Amino acid sequence: MDMEVAKLTSKGQITVPAAIRKKLCLKEGDKLVFVTDDEGIRVLNASVLALERAQKAFAGEAERLGLKTEQDIVDVVNTIRGEMNRDRYANPA
C-alpha cells in the first residue's frame, strides 16, 4: 500500500501530492469526488467517475440496438445529427 501525506490549510484546502495526481490523471481545474462507504473514504477523479457511470448505463445498448461495428455507430450518430440539423433549420428560433 502506498501512502502520501497532505497538509490541510486553515481554509480547508490541501495540495494533492504529485504521485496521487499522476495516479488519478488529474490536471489543473479537474474536480475530485469524495466517496464514503463501508471501507472508508475514497478520492476519485470526477471526470473518470462520470465516464465510468456512463459506460455502465450504456452497457449492452449497442447489442440491443444491433450495432456490431464502429461504422454502425458512426452511421447512427450521422443519422441523429442529420435529424437534429433538419429540425434546427426547419424551425428557426
Image (cartoon, helix red, strand yellow):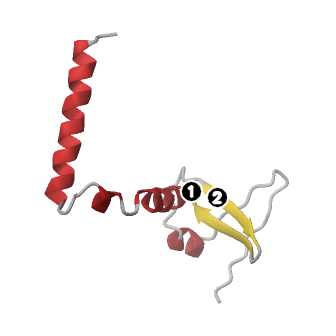
Residue 76 sits in quarter = top left
Q: Which residue is mark 2?
A: 33
Q: Which residue is mark 1?
A: 46
Residue positioned 48% across, 66% down in the render: 25
Is 34 rendered above or below residue 80? Answer: below
- SS at mark 2? strand
State the image coordinates of residue 37 (x, y, percent, origin top left): 74, 70
Given the image, on which type of amino acid does mark 2 rest? Val
**Place of residue 32 in the rendered image (x, y in percent of width and height, measured from the top left):** 62, 57
- Dot placed on the residue nearer the N-terminal end, 1 or 2: 2
Mark 1 and 2 residues: CB-CB less than 8 Å, in contact? yes
Residue shown at the point (52%, 62%) measured from the top left: 26
What amino acid does circle 1 point to? Ala
Residue 11 falls left or right of residue 68: right
Up-down: is 81 above or below 16? above
Q: Quadrant of residue 81?
A: top left
